[in-house]
Structures are given as C-alpha cells and as structure tokens.
Image (tube, rainbow, N blue to C red):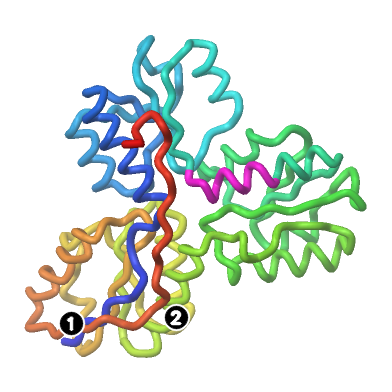
Amino acid sequence: MKVVLAQPRGFCAGVERAIEIVERALVKFGPPIYVRHEIVHNRHVVEDLRARGAVFVDEISEVPDGAITVFSAHGVARVVQKAAADRNLPVIDATCPLVAKVHSEGRRYAGQGREIILIGHAGHAEVEGTIGQIDGQVYLVQTVEDVATLTVEKPDMLSYITQTTLSVDDTRGIIAALIARFPTITGPDVRDICYATQNRQEAVRHLAEQVELILVVGSRNSSNSNRLREIGAELGRPSYLIDDAGHLEAAWFEGITTVGVTAGASAPEVLVRGVLEGLKRFGSIEVEMLAGTPEDVRFKLPSEVSDD
C-alpha cells in the first residue's frame, strides 16, 4: 500500500507557541500550572501536559489563589481576563496572535459604531472568546442560510470578522451572501484569515487527487481537523478522523492501494508516525510526501517565559 503524507500537516505556529508556553512555565515555575480551557484541541497533547503538572480548568474560580494561570490558544473573553485580574492571578496569555488580531479588528470596528457579524461555529472556544472581547452587538452566522434570516439594528453600519480555524474557502460563500444583502458591509482582507488553516485544507485537496482514502489525525473537538475530514469526503474519498493508530480499522483498507494521511493543526507529528506504524499491520507500506506550501512562521513568546 502506498501512503502519501500531506504537506503541510500538523502543528501550526500558534499551537506550537501555546504548547511551548505551558512547557516553559512548568520548567520555570514548577507544577502545577493552571490552564483555562484545553490549551489546544488535542487529547494527546492535553494528557501529556497534564501528566507533567498542567491542570486544565473550565473557570477561573477553579484556580487557587496565586497560581500561575495560562489562557489557551483560543483566547478568552474580557470577563475571564477581569476575573483573573480581580484575583491578582499571575497570567500568561497563550492566545494565538492571529486570534488576537481578530479581537483587535472586532474592537476597532465596534469603536467605529459598527455592529459586528462573526462567521464561526457556535460553542467553539475561540468564538466565545471573540464575542466576549467586543463591546456592542455581535451576531454569529454559521451558514449562508443564517445570513438570509439575520436581523440587525444598523444594516448600513456592519462589519464582519471570522473564526481563524475557518479558511478562505469556508467563508467565501458566507461573505458573498453578506455583501449581497448588506452592500456597505466592511471586513478584513482575506489574507488575514489563518494561513495554516488554508494551507492544510489545500493540501487535502491535492491529496485527494492521488489517493483512494484519507486519514486525518486529530481530535473530535478540533474544528480544523473535522473540516479536513469533511473536505476529503466532499471530494469523494472515504475520510476518517482518528485520534491515533489505535482507531485504525482493517475493513477500511480492503481493496485500497493508496492512502493519504494528514493531521489537524493541533495534532503532533508523533501521532502521524504512530499511524504509519499502525498501517503496517495491514501489509507493507511505501511512504511518500507531497510537495506543499512551506511554512516558516514563528510567533514570539510572551515575556513571562521568554529567554530574552
């Protein structure tokens, strides 16, 4: 069986930065380190950090007085920031800089007196954090159909922003529907949408041209990982989202001679290597790598854990 690896795949710069922040905090300050929400949406990453002394909590009220507190890569609402400040908790902010940029754009639009339309998934940690960062009215739309039924107070004073784990392709139709219905709406340049999300989705499209089946390594609660699987299925390839090699099923590979493997932006490469080993249970494999968009982005660490 030939196995083709997508490129790029796995960790993006924002995820690498967030994980490194927790790792450095554990070394510098010692365990336990408290992390508000899962640092990234990957079960293996979270369990590894938990074993090393990270404690993941849903609410700031669960953090003991004086404990080092890390905000996850998804960002948090202002009410969470205030709750931590009111208790004088020492906070290290691991919010992805691209998420922070969306927060800044939303606040800027709101400061102009505009109502904000956020394109994103209801209940996602990033969406909840973004809404909580913006003063004024924020409307959440998830589909083109949502645009048709949307009721706003100031139709001539609207701006839109997007969840970073959506790509240009994910949002193009919704943005077009918004512009058609609200011709004066403004929004960020499409180049502001997360490069990593777009690159990984494009890699899956290339993968689908060369393989019969696609495996996406990632956790069920990872928005971008789920989207990678959906794209593979939309392109007519049986596609499976798996946490690790333990979820491989022999029946998937009956009659299959070419398999594509990729990973969501929060999935570590060690899990991909484990899947390659797991595939050997079903016969010998030949591995090749697709050419893809190179990524050399690296985000600066916060001063609390930086070597500078």
Q: Which residue is mark 2?
A: 205
Q: Which sits in the foreground, 95 or 5? A: 95
**Magenta: main secondary structure:** helix
Give amino acid for label 2.
Arg
Identify the image quadrant of residue 192. Answer: bottom right
Q: What residue did someone put label 1 on?
A: 287
Q: Is residue 63 above or below residue 153?
A: above
**Dot 2 alpha-carbon crowd within 10 angstroms: few under 14, some 14 to 19, many 20 or more:** some
Query: In the picture, residue 55 is in which quadrant?
Result: top left
Q: How many marks?
A: 2
Range of residues picked out in magenta: 96-105
Q: CA distance from mark 2 to mark 1?
A: 18 Å
The x, y position of residue 116, in whole percent, is: 76, 46
Query: Residue at the location (47% across, 12% down)?
Result: 88
Circle 1 SS class: strand
Which amino acid type is marked by label 1?
Answer: Val
Q: How far from the left and from the top, in percent, is residue 276?
A: 16, 71
Residue visible at 41% across and 84% down in the picture: 206
